[in-house]
Amino acid sequence: MQKDVELVLMMDEKPMIYVDADACPVKSETLHCAKTFDVSVVFVASYKNMMNDPEGEWIYVDADKEAADLQIVNSVKKGDIVITADIGLAGTLLAKRVYVLSPRGKEYTEDKIMSLLDMRYQSAKLRRQGKHTKGPKSFTKEDRKAYVEKLMEILSNFAGNDGSVSN
């Protein structure tokens, strides 16, 4: 009985979108997609990246390395959507049954997160040894398009009262 009530409540609730905003290249695309489905967006950024008259709701946190991540982790609920390129944050959020999407349109999933975390660890280990590793590829129009398509897909599933959380 409790699970049925939970499912009905979740189907009636729209997800919130949280954006790890300090270096996010798809802020305007996120707002556009959210407006299409009448979904709220919360941008979380450090005070050092404060913007003048930004569009959307903004939460500013200390400039500490993990402050924005902690704000997001403590704010999200099951079924919300988070936009981040931070694989560590993604791994934490998946356990909370949150959709996690990279700005390049890749959805982080339970079956892929461990290998991504391992690759991140191996790269950090090589850098500590003084070896150079490749950084991320340049952000492209194709990345932007893939992001919009994936976010619209996730939001349309909610709009259709699919109510399911794939994570």
Image: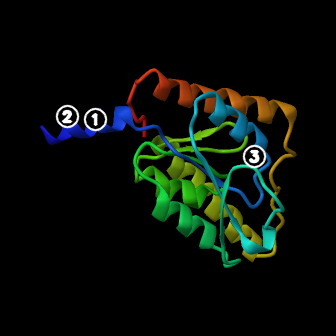
Q: Find residue 57 and report its horizontal and vertical position in percent.
A: 65, 54
- Residue 26 visible in rendering: no
What type is the residue that disc 1 sits on?
Answer: Leu
Disc 2: which residue? 4
Element marked by disc 3: helix
Q: Find residue 15 and report its horizontal and vertical position in percent.
A: 48, 41
Residue at horizontal 65%, vertical 33%? 35
Question: Pointers 1 and 2 in contact (CB under 8 A)?
Answer: yes
Residues 65 and 49: in front is 49
Q: How many marks?
A: 3
Residue at horizontal 84%, vertical 46%? 137
Residue at horizontal 36%, vertical 32%? 11
- Compared with 124, 17 (above or below) is above
The local crowd at label 2, few if under 14, some if 14 to 19, many if 20 or more residues have their Cα within 10 Å, is: few
Indicate which disc residue 27 carries. 3
Between the C-alphas of marks 2 and 3, the distance is 35 Å
The local crowd at label 1, few if under 14, some if 14 to 19, many if 20 or more residues have their Cα within 10 Å, is: few
